[in-house]
Image (cartoon, grey):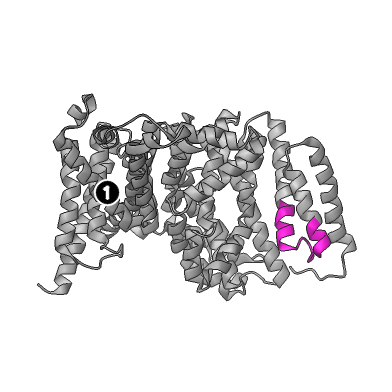
């Protein structure tokens, strides 16, 4: 058989599995999910099969069949135990005794297959962490102090981690097997239908002509699509291929162009209404209505993007960069006339979630249905069979990395629950902080940045929610503020060296070195390191409190954000010297502090600084 023929068969097999997986998920979304263990085992079976078909031993993407024997071997040892669990889920649900010898062998096969699939997908770090926690579960009773726990046999561990709903088949995989898959599929539907190009065109039209327009276009477009896509890296790779070259072409440095795209794409994951589908996860873990989580995240997210836009504007002001000529801006009218249907489904999604208060799964299924219906009705962009197939491929392939990682992270979460380590870690953090909230927040921030490095958002948040969030809640932090705190820093790890995946991808597109791009991204996104501290101390920024408090704190936060951006860029209305820069940063900190006297002093200095730049500092040219 020829090589091209083998590649064709391999591609057809992958496409068939992707299409079948999407049909399964849509079916359960419409008619109701199967019992948890059955639903999750089938979901994992699809994901793990695709991984071994698509990734070789070194984790590289396959272009054809490759090592056929190896693929069959790894798929077999992974699928046999999953089939056993799917067939016997009712028995396993009521099983109280420890695992049998047969179950032990099958469970070990699944763990080995899962760890190997994870290694090929996200690298060595996550499998190694999972192995460490398995060893800890077995031999942790030998450790001293608070790390010690009661003795668990390997049979007990298998029963808990594999045959129950606490480990591999726990909450982490559960959210992927139900609604998160559907939102990733919805993002794929929008992408294939051309919504990404429409979002970029709209952003270009309204932001492209102003000072620093191309960079502001990148911020707006990445914000729009990032909230849906749920992956900073995927968003950089998607919108960055257009925005980064455009920024470079209009005069921005490659490192700055890449950093803008990385920061804007990363922020999309905490931008309501969808927050990359992770808002539903926060809602489920905190037992809070979805709309309340999305509402709480709104002001912090807007402040983040306000800061990024200011950074871009001040950079353009310093360097004298102009916007795109009006003659080159796209015309929105004809574009919307042709693609009006692409704007209907996001509005429907908001209506289903925020007005109708539907569940995430029901809202996602109906939104996908509305999208397909409008694509059939609109004669300008009729849905083709090949487009349907491509949507299924992108949806399924966009899910496998997160699903595999979440299944393996389930081992870590299960070990923490079984041994009580999660509660112990919270106690350790509180003890290290000496009961001081500010110190606990710093320790939590560092822990979140480290644990979030290289992990998908969903997996990172789930780990953090059981390790460090309880410590914050124990010291009196509002539960939504505590979970949004770790959520933010888990996401920001995507632009934080040394494992700044979003910055790495952006640097590649910008053809720039990784380190300058990453450090510039940290500077542009630095307000995200401050905002979580603010809403922990002052929940008014997460819509907790009276309307007057919320309005006042938002106004103060806007002023502080403006001065913070001005200080870091050394530009307000004119270029600023060292003294003005120092005053701007100091005043920003005063305004960020949640005290009325610091607010009043900060506002006074803010007014003086603006007045000085407007009327007294006329010797320096204004770049507009």
Q: Specify whether residue 374 is in view.
A: no
Residue at image location 36% in from the left, 46% down from the top:
132
Left or right: 178 in relation to 34: right
Residue at image location 27% in from the left, 32% down from the top:
156
Left or right: 597 in relation to 76: right
Position in image of residue 491 (x %, y %)? 51, 49
Quarter residue 220 falls in: bottom right
Q: Secondary structure at mark 1?
A: helix
Front-lying residue, 39 or 162 = 162
Q: Is residue 422 above or below residue 375?
A: above
* Quadrant assignment for the N terminus: bottom left
Q: Is residue 577 magenta?
A: yes
User: For mark 1, does the 10 Å Cα neighbourhood hold few (<14), some (14 to 19), or many (20 or more) residues?
Assistant: many
Q: Which residue is mark 1?
A: 114
The stretch of residues the image draws in magenta is 562-582
Position in image of residue 115 (x %, y %)? 29, 50
Q: Main secondary structure of the magenta part?
A: helix
Q: Is residue 136 above or below residue 617?
A: above
Left or right: 244 in relation to 524: left
Residue at image location 62% in from the left, 65% down from the top:
213
Position in image of residue 540 (x %, y %)? 66, 34
Q: Specify whether residue 314 is in view.
A: yes
* Quadrant assignment for the C terminus: bottom right
Left or right: 217 in relation to 423: right
């Amino acid at each position: 058989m020829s090589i091209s023929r083998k590649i064709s068969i391999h591609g057809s097999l992958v496409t068939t599995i992707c299409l079948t997986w999407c049909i399964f998920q849509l079916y359960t979304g419409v008619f109701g999910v199967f019992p948890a263990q059955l639903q999750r085992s089938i979901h994992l079976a699809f994901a793990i099969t695709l991984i071994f078909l698509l990734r070789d031993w070194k984790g590289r993407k396959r272009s054809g069949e490759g090592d056929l024997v190896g693929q069959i071997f790894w798929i077999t040892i992974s699928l046999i135990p999953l089939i056993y669990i799917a067939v016997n889920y009712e028995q396993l649900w009521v099983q109280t005794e420890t695992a049998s010898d047969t179950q032990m062998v099958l469970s070990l096969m699944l763990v080995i297959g899962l760890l190997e699939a994870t290694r090929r997908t996200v690298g060595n770090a996550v499998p190694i962490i999972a192995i460490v926690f398995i060893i800890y579960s077995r031999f942790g009773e030998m450790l001293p102090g608070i790390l010690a726990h009661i003795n668990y046999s390997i049979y007990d561990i298998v029963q808990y981690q594999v045959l129950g709903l606490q480990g591999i088949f726990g909450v982490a995989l559960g959210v992927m097997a139900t609604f998160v898959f559907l939102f990733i599929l919805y993002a794929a539907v929008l992408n294939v239908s051309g919504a990404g190009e429409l979002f970029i065109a709209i952003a270009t039209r309204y932001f492209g002509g102003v000072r620093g327009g191309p960079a502001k276009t990148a911020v707006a477009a990445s914000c729009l699509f990032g909230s849906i896509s749920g992956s900073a890296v995927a968003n950089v790779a998607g919108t960055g291929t257009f925005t980064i070259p455009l920024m470079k072409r209009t005069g921005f440095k490659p490192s700055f162009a890449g950093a803008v795209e990385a920061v804007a794409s990363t922020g999309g994951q905490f931008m309501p209404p969808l927050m990359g589908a992770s808002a539903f996860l926060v809602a489920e873990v905190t037992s809070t209505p979805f709309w309340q989580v999305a509402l709480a995240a709104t002001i912090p997210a807007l402040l983040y993007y306000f800061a990024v836009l200011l950074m871009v504007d001040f950079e353009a002001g310093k360097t004298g960069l102009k916007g795109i000529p009006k003659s080159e801006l796209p015309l929105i009218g004809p574009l919307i006339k042709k693609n009006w249907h692409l704007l209907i489904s996001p509005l429907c999604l908001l209506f289903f979630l925020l007005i109708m208060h539907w569940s995430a799964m029901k809202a996602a299924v109906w939104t996908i249905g509305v999208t397909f219906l409008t694509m059939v009705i609109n004669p300008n962009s009729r849905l083709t069979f090949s487009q349907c197939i491509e949507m299924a491929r992108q949806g399924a392939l966009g899910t496998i990395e997160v699903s595999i990682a979440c299944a393996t992270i389930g081992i870590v979460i299960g070990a923490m629950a079984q041994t009580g380590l999660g509660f112990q870690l919270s106690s350790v953090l509180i003890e290290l902080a000496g009961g001081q909230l500010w110190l606990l927040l710093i320790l939590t921030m560092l822990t979140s940045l480290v644990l979030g490095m290289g992990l998908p958002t969903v997996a990172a948040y789930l780990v953090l929610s059981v390790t460090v969030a309880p410590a914050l809640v124990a010291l009196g932090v509002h539960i939504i503020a505590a979970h949004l705190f770790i959520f933010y820093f888990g996401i920001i790890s995507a632009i934080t060296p040394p494992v700044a995946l979003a910055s790495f991808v952006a640097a590649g597109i910008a053809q720039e070195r990784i380190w300058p791009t990453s450090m510039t991204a940290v500077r542009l996104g630095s307000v995200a390191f401050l905002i979580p501290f603010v809403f922990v101390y002052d929940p008014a920024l997460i819509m907790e409190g009276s309307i007057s408090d919320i309005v006042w704190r938002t106004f103060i936060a806007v002023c502080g954000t403006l001065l913070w951006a001005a200080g870091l860029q050394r530009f307000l209305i004119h270029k600023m010297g060292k003294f003005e820069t120092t005053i701007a940063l100091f005043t920003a900190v005063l305004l960020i502090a949640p005290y009325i006297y610091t607010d009043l002093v900060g506002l006074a200095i803010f007014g003086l600084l603006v007045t000085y730049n407007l009327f007294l500092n006329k010797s320096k040219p204004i770049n507009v």
